[in-house]
Image (cartoon, helix red, strand yellow):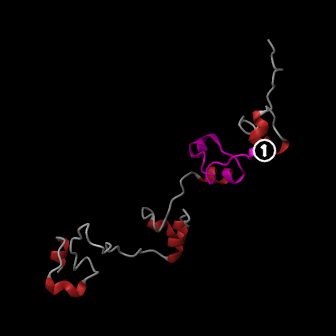
Amino acid sequence: CKRAAKDGKCLPECQDYKGDISCCNPVQFPTTTVPPVRPPPTCEPICLSEAKKGKCPSQCKKYEGDSSCCAPPKCKAICMSEAKKGKCPTECKQFKGDAKCCGECSSECKNAAKSNQCLPQCEIYKGDTTCCNPGYLPPPTTR
């Protein structure tokens, strides 16, 4: 049965093993409605649930490479910790748009920065002129 299953077959005498693709593995054609049999995950439930959240706790590190059991962070720890403070260091700019890896200032800060201002609560973004821009606006010119 196992030899036939490796060739994508299920011999009549192996029908009792249907569902176990190591013993009965009929090649499915697109017209069939039978979904392919997937082996169940081999990790603890905590790893499964945390991986769905994009995390990989220390007890699940042994499953690195299996994204259903251990989802590695997309960015460095420094990016995640700074993003929680609403900051986005230079080495994290590639993750802009992902609030977990690159923090952004509020729309209030952005609007003030467009007017060459930096509100007191936005000073933590000094250096990012889209959030804190205490620049000088020249008077409008008239011709």
Check disc 1: other Cα within 10 Å, few if <14, some if 14-19, many if 20+. Answer: few
Q: Is residue 42 above or below residue 61?
A: below
Residue at x 56% of width, y 65% of height: 53
Q: Which one is nearer the viewer's eye here, 75 or 1? A: 1
Q: Is residue 15 left or right of residue 37?
A: left
Figure quadrant of residue 16: bottom left
Q: Is residue 45 left or right of residue 99?
A: left
Residue at x 76% of width, y 36% of height: 113
Q: Which one is nearer the viewer's eye here, 107 or 102? A: 107
Q: Which one is nearer the viewer's eye here, 136 or 75? A: 136
Q: Is residue 69 left or right of residue 38?
A: right
- x, y percentage for residue 84? 69, 54
Which residues are drawn in magenta?
83-107
Q: Is 90 inside the magenta-drawn segment?
A: yes
Q: Is residue 84 above or below residue 37?
A: above
Residue at x 53% of width, y 72% of height: 49
- x, y percentage for residue 79? 62, 50
Amino acid type of disc 1? Glu
Q: Which one is nearer the viewer's eye here, 127 or 63? A: 127
Q: Quadrant of the C terminus?
A: top right
Q: Which residue is mark 1?
A: 108
Q: Is 38 inside the magenta-drawn segment?
A: no
| Magenta stretch prevailing secondary structure | loop
Q: Is residue 37 left or right of residue 10?
A: right
Q: Quadrant of the N terminus?
A: bottom left
- x, y percentage for residue 78? 63, 50
What kind of element bears circle 1?
A: helix
